């Protein structure tokens, strides 16, 4: 689906990928949080995490846990800040146009 | 949080961020940016990222031309890759009436030194090979129009401003403005009060509410605009495309995604930013009419933002009649990202040196007293 070559060259056990679609690693997420991007919405805009074809299904729960751990805020509070944007799954433009 | 500041900027969209940077660069560093949510949470972070100079009023054309000059070197200046792609803007026309409007616009633009030109459908297809040129009667093209990533622009501006001493307070909405003797003497926020030198109203679609706190009525109205983005594909279009026929706009990001939207002339003023199925259907229909080859591309996400629209679709800039330390920097009507760099310079000139440029004089709030003649191309 994506045309870009992978940016990730490190070993997964050293720095695991948190967001597969956009290839964002754990250390990048932690650094961004420490730089002040300390809500899910801000992390998303800064790192593109959750903006890929999975619509954040895989990465957002992981991100919420990391964010909760780094900031000491409750998981539910962190999760509650994210907005869900349709469509729920990627659907081709042809479908939306109708026939 | 600071309890006083020479300059209090309300809003951390591109306008507030660019102004904070411009002031700091000139040595005015006691600047406090108050943001109700987080930087880019309003229209800037929801916009298509287009940087167009092909307007129909001299002010909009000049502001955009000067801004493009700044954007061309902004990545180096800010030390942040703003993903600036100067691939031009192709503006499509489908009727003879639209074609006539384009002739007039290009004549004015050329007079002001903009290298825009009229294209035949065949020439338009050379700019965008995937275009179905039978859908149009002509187009205009300006090779120096561009697009960029609004998040990176705001991040860059704020980072360099904060290095120079500017303070940013996010999740800090302004709840009231206290006026005494023709001045704002206190800015009340949910986290305490600030005594301001000057206050800049850069709150975008919420500018009307901010102004009202100080007893000032703005003619601005918030209008929802919806937008969508697809999965990425190989980079094939540098040009950004808009149509004055239906208000569609679309471009390709450096990631390869097609981002675009379409205005709805029936949209009523309001703060609703929900997404609609109707938008997606209309957008897909019009996009695929122009570029049928994109039909297989999947839509990943849709969202909406608010245009801050004035009666003449031009911004409201500069001092407020009757309230000496309130500066307006709003009413961009969907074009704020395009002209923010130059507007920041003009507003900084005013704050730093009391210089009222011709643009500030003509675009001040007081212009809405008489008859209004405005921008005709209110598109992304």
Image (cartoon, coloured by chain):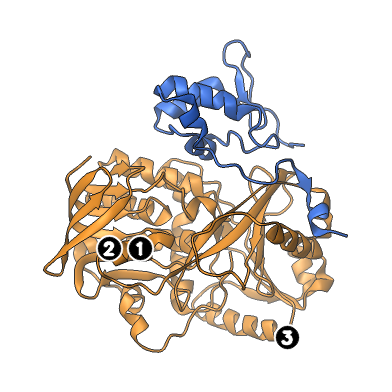
Residue at 79% from the left image edge and 63% from the top image edge? B131
Contact between marks 2 and 1 (CB within 8 A): the answer is: yes
Tell me the chain of label 3: B
Can you see residue B239? Answer: no
Can you see residue B40? Answer: yes
Image-quadrant location for residue B263: bottom right
Mark 1 Cα within 10 Å, few/some/many (few <14, many 20+)? some
Q: Report the number of discs.
A: 3
Spot occupied by residue B90 in the image (x, y as percentages of width and height)? 67, 67
Spot occupied by residue B360 in the image (x, y as percentages of width and height)? 32, 73
Residue at the farthest bottom position: B371
Spot occupied by residue B61 in the image (x, y as percentages of width and height)? 49, 73
Mark 3 Cα within 10 Å, few/some/many (few <14, many 20+)? few
Q: Tell me the tag on residue B96.
A: 3
Query: On the image, numbered disc 1 is attached to which residue?
Result: B209
Spot occupied by residue B194 in the image (x, y as percentages of width and height)? 19, 49
Tell me the chain of label 2: B
Contact between marks 3 and 2 (CB within 8 A): the answer is: no
**Is B245 drawn above or below residue B213 in the view shown?**
below
Residue at 80% from the left image edge and 65% from the top image edge? B289
Secondary structure of the residue carrying numbered label 3: helix
Mark 3 or mark 2: whose residue is earlier in sequence: 3
Residue at 83% from the left image edge and 55% from the top image edge? B293
Residues beneath discs 3 and 1 located on the same chain: yes
Left or right position of B213 against A62: left
Query: On the image, numbered disc 2 is attached to which residue?
Result: B213
Mark 2 Cα within 10 Å, few/some/many (few <14, many 20+)? some
Secondary structure of the residue carrying numbered label 2: helix
**Chain letter, colour blue in render:** A
Residue at the farthest right position: A99
Palette colour of chain B: orange
Mark 3 or mark 2, whichever is nearer to me: 2
């Amino acid at each position: 689906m994506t045309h870009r070559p992978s940016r990730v060259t490190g070993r997964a056990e050293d720095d695991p990928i948190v967001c597969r679609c956009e290839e964002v690693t754990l250390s990048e997420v932690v650094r961004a949080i420490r730089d002040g991007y300390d809500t899910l919405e801000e992390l998303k805009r800064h790192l593109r995490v959750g903006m890929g074809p999975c619509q954040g299904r895989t990465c957002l729960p992981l991100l919420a846990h990391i964010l909760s751990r780094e900031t000491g805020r409750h998981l539910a509070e962190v999760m509650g800040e994210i907005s869900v944007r349709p469509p729920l799954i990627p659907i081709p433009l042809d479908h939306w146009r109708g026939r | 949080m600071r309890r006083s500041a020479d300059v209090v900027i309300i809003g951390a969209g591109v306008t507030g961020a660019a102004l904070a940077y411009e002031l700091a660069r000139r040595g005015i560093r006691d600047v406090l940016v108050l943001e109700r949510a987080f930087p880019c949470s309003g229209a800037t972070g929801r916009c298509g990222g287009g940087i167009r100079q092909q307007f129909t009023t001299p002010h909009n054309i000049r502001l955009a031309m000067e801004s493009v000059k700044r954007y061309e070197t902004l990545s180096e200046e800010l030390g942040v890759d703003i993903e600036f792609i100067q691939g031009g803007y192709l503006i499509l026309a489908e009727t003879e009436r639209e074609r006539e409007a384009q002739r007039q616009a290009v004549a004015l633009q050329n007079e002001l030194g903009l290298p825009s030109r009229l294209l035949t459908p065949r020439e338009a297809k050379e700019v965008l090979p995937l275009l179905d040129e039978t859908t149009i009667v002509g187009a205009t093209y300006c090779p120096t129009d561009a697009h960029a990533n609004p998040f990176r622009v705001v991040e860059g501006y704020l980072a360099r401003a904060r290095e120079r001493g500017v303070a940013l307070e996010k999740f800090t909405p302004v709840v009231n403005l206290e006026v005494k003797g023709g001045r704002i003497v206190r800015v009340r926020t949910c986290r305490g009060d600030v005594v301001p030198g000057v206050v800049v109203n850069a709150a975008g679609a919420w500018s009307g509410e901010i102004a009202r706190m100080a007893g000032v009525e703005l003619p601005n109205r918030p209008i929802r605009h919806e937008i969508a983005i697809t999965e990425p594909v190989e980079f094939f279009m540098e040009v950004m495309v808009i149509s004055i026929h239906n208000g569609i706009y679309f471009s390709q990001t450096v990631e390869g995604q097609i981002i675009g939207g379409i205005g709805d002339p029936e949209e009523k003023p309001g703060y609703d930013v929900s997404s609609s199925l109707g938008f997606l259907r209309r957008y897909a229909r019009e996009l695929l009419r122009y570029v049928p080859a994109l039909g297989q591309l999947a839509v990943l996400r849709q969202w909406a933002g608010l245009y801050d629209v004035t009666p003449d679709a031009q911004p409201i800039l500069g001092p407020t009649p009757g309230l000496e330390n309130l500066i307006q920097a709003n009413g961009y009507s969907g074009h704020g990202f395009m002209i923010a760099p130059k507007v920041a310079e003009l507003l900084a000139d005013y704050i730093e040196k009391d210089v009222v440029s011709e643009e500030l004089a003509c675009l001040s709030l007081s212009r809405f007293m008489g008859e209004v003649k405005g921008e005709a191309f209110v598109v992304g």
